[in-house]
Amino acid sequence: MPNQFYIQDWIKIKNGAIFNSEESVFAFSEDELNPFLKAAYDNLKLEYPKFHKMDGLSKLGILASEIIFRKNKATKDTALVFSNNASSLETDRQFQDSTKTFASPSLFVYTLPNIVLGEISIKFKLQSENAFFISENFNAELLQSYTESLLLSEKAPEVLCGWLDLQNGEYDVFLCLVSKEKNIPFSEENLKKIYCAENEKPTH
Amino acid sequence: MKNLHTELKESIIEQLNLEDMEPADIGNEEPLFGDGLGLDSIDALELIVLLEKDYGIKLTDPTQGKEIFVSIDRMATYIEENRTK
């Protein structure tokens, strides 16, 4: 097939564990968000002080993309197509709490879900297309069609797409790198299959 | 009683999430922005909040921050001269 694209690599982060293409990359004794994020940062030897200033959603996005892009170098045109259920609700609530005393500027700047796309773009020097969709559930059809349209129109040579959700301290991340590099055929079915594998209880 | 310089350094580390930093890592005359600690514009807003919250100093003109947030020394002097708590 001339326009066949592939899931070149993928990552899952959930319940204190990180999997990269079915291989366990990191597992932590507790799944509570902040200790897990700090332990994963240390384990990956990230050395990116700005990480500590980010909100939970951005930290999850940085960790996931770091693991993917260490193995598969991003180009400035690598696009990002993310989605989730909770938008930036976790940080929105924290910001709202802060307004009872002194509104926090550093929380305010993370009260949009697409900020994580900016953080990833800054870290990996991307100057590419990006989009963040909010949907009730993991929507493989939406991700597949939007990603494929970017690839077919040659807006991007590869796309990092998937699900990045955080609510009530529970996190559910599934991102995959889609390109012409042969591996798992990129289809709605395969996206669902990989996302749902061992994912008995999605956050949504 | 804790020295104001040390107290400030501890507050800045905590408020600005400068993980992996200790108060001793911040020099009293070291620039807080640019080549020094490398703080950014959002950090400057957090410092304005810190002045009000911890010392009762309300900056009416945010551009004043440029003169105050030069270094720990400069901040401490400004706080000593203007604090209401």
Image (spheres, coloured by chain):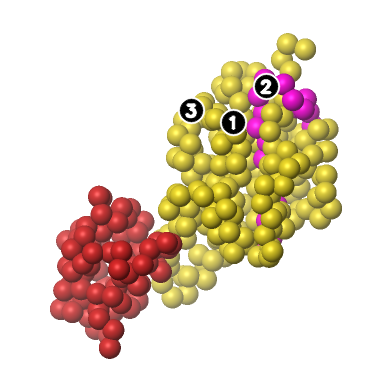
Q: Colour of chain B?
A: red
Q: Position of residue A115 (x, y in %)?
A: 51, 47
Residue type beneath disc 2:
Glu
**Horizontal side of residue B66 vs A174, given as left or right:** left
Chain letter behind tag 2: A
Chain letter behind tag 3: A
- Which residue is found at the position 58% from the left and 59% from the top? A39
The earlier-in-sequence mark between 2 and 1 is: 1
Q: For this rendering, which residue is in front, A78 or A49?
A: A49
Circle 2/circle 1 CB separation < 8 Å: yes
Q: Which residue is mark 1?
A: A72
Image: A157 above or below A202: above
Q: Which residue is mark 3?
A: A76
Residue type beneath disc 3:
Lys
Image: B61 above or below A122: below
**Quick one: SS at disc 2?**
loop
Q: Which residues are magenta?
A: A168-188
- State the image quarter where residue A83 is shown: top right
Mark 1 Cα within 10 Å, few/some/many (few <14, many 20+)?
few
**Quick one: SS at disc 3?**
loop
Please identify, in this view, whether the residue under mark 3 or under mark 1 is nearer the observer.
Answer: 1
Q: Position of residue A45 (x, y in %)?
A: 51, 50
User: Can you tell which mark lies on residue A181?
Assistant: 2
Chain letter behind tag 1: A
Q: Looking at the figure, which quarter contains the N terminus of chain A?
A: top right
Letter of the yellow chain = A
